[in-house]
Every structure is written in C-alpha cells, then in structure tokens.
Image (cartoon, rainbow, N blue to C red):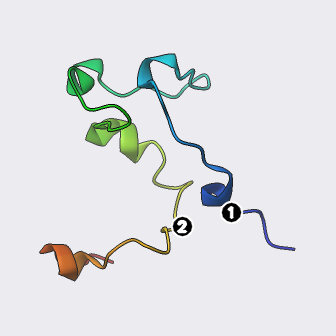
C-alpha cells in the first residue's frame, strides 16, 4: 500500500518560533521572519535543502513554474 501523503497530514504553523525540529535538522534563520505577517514565513535555502530528498510531492494547487516566470529544471 502507498504511504500516506505528507501533505495530507501537514498543519499550519501559527508561530514559527514554537517549532521544535528533530535532532540534526537546522531551523530557519530567525532574521528572515522579523516583522512578517501572521502565518507568513520565509525560509532560507539551506533550511529547505535539508528536505530535498524527503519532500518530493507537490500540492495539487501549485502553479506550473512557467506560469510564474520560471523555467523548469529536471
């Protein structure tokens, strides 16, 4: 049987400073989220790259890269 979708079990983050990451996972740079809107967060490249080999699913409502002016890289 297929594994349950990570996206199906994801939850919204209210306060990014309250997140506890597993050992070995670096948290995002705090300075990127000073004075951000509630529920809107910014993540640095190094933080996101930690999940590159784990999170490969895309949300159904994600626009194609071409629609936002980017080229697709395979």
* Residue depicted at x 57% and y 20%: 20
Q: Position of residue 50 (x, y in %)?
A: 45, 42
Label 1 with label 2: CB-CB less than 8 Å: yes
Above or below residue 50? Residue 19 is above
Q: How many marks are shown on the rendered structure?
A: 2
For this rendering, which residue is in front, 60 or 39? 39
How far apart marks 1 and 2 lie (CA) works out to 8 Å
Find disc 2 in the rendering and name its residue.
Answer: 57
Indicate the quadrant where residue 35 lies: top left
Q: Residues within 10 Å of mark 2 (few under 14, many from 20)?
A: few
* Residue depicted at x 51% and y 18%: 18
For this rendering, which residue is in front, 53 or 5? 5
For this rendering, which residue is in front, 63 or 46? 63
Can you say which quadrant of the picture contains the N terminus?
bottom right
SS label for mark 2: loop
SS label for mark 1: loop
- Which numbered marker is on residue 5? 1
């Amino acid at each position: 049987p297929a594994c349950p979708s990570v996206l199906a079990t994801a939850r919204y983050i209210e306060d990014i400073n309250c997140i506890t990451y597993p050992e070995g996972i670096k948290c995002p740079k705090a300075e990127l989220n000073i004075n951000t809107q509630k529920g809107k967060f910014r993540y640095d490249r190094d933080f996101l790259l930690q999940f590159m080999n784990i999170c490969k699913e895309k949300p159904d409502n994600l626009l194609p890269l071409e629609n936002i002016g980017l080229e697709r890289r395979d």
